[in-house]
Amino acid sequence: MIPFFRAGFHAGRDRKSIDGKLKNLITQMIIPFTVMLVLVVGLFLVFMLQDARMSSNITTASRFNHNFKDEVDLKMYTFVSGSSEELPFAEVETARGLAETLLRTTGNREAHRTIQSVLNLCDNLYDSIVQIRDAVGYDERMQQLESNIYVITELIEEYIYTYLYIEAGELAESQQQFNTVVILESLAAGILMLLLIRRTAARTRKISSSITAPIDALYDRVDEIGHGDLQSRPPVQAEDEKLQSLSDGVEQMVQKLDTQMKLNNEEQLRLRSMELALIQAQINPHFLYNTLDAIVWLIETGKTEQAEKMIISLSTYFRSFLSNGKEIITLAEEERHIRSYLEIQQVRYKDILSYQIDFDPEYSQCLIPKMTLQPLVENAIYHGIKQKRGGGTILISDECDGTWITLRVKDTGTGIPEETLAELRAGLENDETPGFGITAAYKRLKLLFGDKCTFDISSISGVGTEISIRIPWVTEIGEEK
């Protein structure tokens, strides 16, 4: 039944899935916002870098000596009048260095021309100072001082102030542009968000409808199947490939189940008494009933995936239980049997039961009697874990020294009182151990290995119980390692 269900489940892969629609919807939302974010961040960085550059230029220009003209003119006058031999070369070089710095970082054309003029004037001023120094006679020096030096220093100061005015104006204009861009981008982002919200809401309603309507129809169909209606019906139509495949698989499963039931009806009637006798003799019927009830409940509540897993575990459990009629099986087969049993039980007791199976693959071919460990695990669940408030854990492991292999089933349940534990140990030898389900396992081990096997039970009340089995490591009957 399960292979047909899976075949139907994968029948409509060419259709666009709901997962794909949701991813597409998310992509359509993310891309516009990402583009808008990149634009906003990019413009912000451009304006920030531009403002930082202009602010730096203004700060640099502000370091210009505001007494530059007075100091240069005074030094030149005292030199011409003969009161001092010092010339203002240092002041001119400082002004020139400032102009060169600004020339490298200025982007505005007008400001660039202005600072270039300052640089040229500094060169002229330097040359004029040299000419005065080399001139002969007071009158000639005074004439050059008045016609060159005074005029050039005044122009240098004027151009520096003009440069500051231009840069400050450009900075203010840049900030105004930035404010305008921020307002426009905010409006654009708001409009884009409203459009996306409207589109997303419409797409979400459509996707939601395409999910809920087929699920409701599937729920009704599964409910009908649960009440015994195995008549063939057209599959529920769904846009999503998985829902459509699920519906197709359910109908195929129903058809196959109905056909198989009709074909096997007579044979089942003939074998039923024998099979029931076998099952009732070796397993707890309540386990099967409770498992089937849990599967029906999972189907009725729409948890078909969990129901499928539980059916697979139950199928594995019975396959390993029957084991093609073999009474001696490998440790790997016993592990599969235990694992399927615990998977089923964990669905029923998921809030109180946890387990861990730690078997070394190297010893997987070791032979043991069938149903050796499962009764021990069942005993741990019903007499240990279920009785303890808050539940507990079952640990199943193996250990081998090359000759002997030790199998352990340990639980963190309520443990066994000392008097009961003493009775249990004594009863292992005389089949008088009611209620614990471990005597049969012990007897089968004794029949196969005789005195070469040991079966130890240790327990602390309120802490837990551990059962340890020590047997020879053999891979063929009659072989000993």
Image (tube, rainbow, N blue to C red):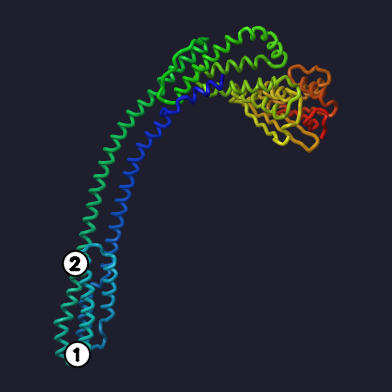
> Dot 1: within a 10 Å radius of its alpha carbon, few (fewer than 14), some, or many (20 or more) residues?
some
Where does residue 164 sit, x and y in percent of width and height? 22, 65
Name above or below for residue 75 compared with residue 437. Answer: below
Query: On the rendered structure, is 169 left or right of 440?
Result: left
Q: Which residue is mark 2?
A: 162
Q: Are marks 1 and 2 in contact (CB under 8 Å)?
A: no
Residue drawn at (49%, 13%), measured in percent from left and top? 223
Frontmost residue, 473 versus 255: 255
Q: Check the picture and name the quadrant holding the N terminus.
A: top right
**Regarding mark 1 in the picture, which secondary structure is present there?**
loop
Frontmost residue, 239 versus 63: 239
**Regarding mark 2 in the picture, which secondary structure is present there?**
helix
Q: Residue furthest front?
A: 263
Sequence-earlier tag: 1 or 2: 1
Where does residue 277 sit, x and y in percent of width and height? 71, 11
Name above or below for residue 22 compared with residue 267. Answer: below
Q: Which residue is mark 1?
A: 135
Frontmost residue, 224 versus 291: 224
> Dot 2: within a 10 Å radius of its alpha carbon, few (fewer than 14), some, or many (20 or more) residues?
some
Query: On the rendered structure, is 133 left or right of 450?
Result: left
